Image (cartoon, grey):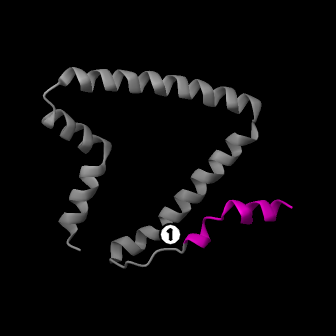
Amino acid sequence: MPRGVTDGRRAATSPDGSIAAAVALSKHMWVLILGGLLGILAMRFAAQGFVKLLELFPRLEVCAFAAVGVIGLKLLLEFPMDVVGLERRLPPEATYATAQEYSQQLE
């Protein structure tokens, strides 16, 4: 696939690209502003909920850091393949397990 097509697709699906497209195509700017404000309020309440959840279950913080680390490691391993142009990816089994497999490991 040509590089420009991939870059264009990433730009269209990025938050900045979709916001710019919405502003450019919308005739009702008040809807966009209201949606943005409601989104900010929703994120504040969601963040407060996560803080309470972390207070109840402090080990969730360690799990979140581990998940971010695994995702970062996977991205680092896939990056050279993207630079060289190979389409090969890590198999999903290398980083993900089904809920059933995970529960069997805990037993």
Front one among 99 and 54: 99
Instruction: Answer with the quarter of the image where residue 34 lies.
Output: top left
Q: Where residue 104 appears, x then y in whole percent?
A: 80, 65
Residue at image coords 73%, 28%: 55
Is residue 99 left or right of 41 when viewed as pictured?
A: right
Disc 1 marks which residue? 77
Residue 82 image point, x, y percent: 36, 71
The answer to which image quadrant residue 28 occupies is: top left
Residue 22's place in the image compared with 107, above or below, is: above
Quadrant location of the C terminus in the rendered image: bottom right
Residue 14 shown in magenta:
no
Viewer-nearest residue: 57 or 73: 57
Q: Is residue 55 above or below residue 91?
A: above
Residue 106: in magenta span: yes
Kind of residue at badge 1:
Leu
Q: Is residue 46 left or right of residue 89?
A: right
| Residue shown at the point (69%, 32%) measured from the top left | 54
Image x and y of residue 50, in percent: 62, 31
Q: Residue at x 60, y 71 (%)?
A: 94
Number of marks in the image? 1
Q: Magenta stretch mostly in which secondary structure?
A: helix
Q: Viewer-proximal residue, 85 or 8?
A: 8
* Residue at x 73%, y 66% (from the top left corner): 101
Mark 1 is surrounded, within 10 Å at the Cα level, by few (under 14), some (14 to 19) or many (20 or more) other residues, namely few
Magenta region: which residues? 92-107
Image coords of residue 93 (percent x, y): 61, 72
Q: Furthest residue to the right?
A: 107
Query: Quarter of the image containing the N terminus?
Result: bottom left
Left/right of residue 49 with respect to residue 4 in the rendered view: right
Check the image and report above or below for 83 versus 70: below
Circle 1: element type: helix
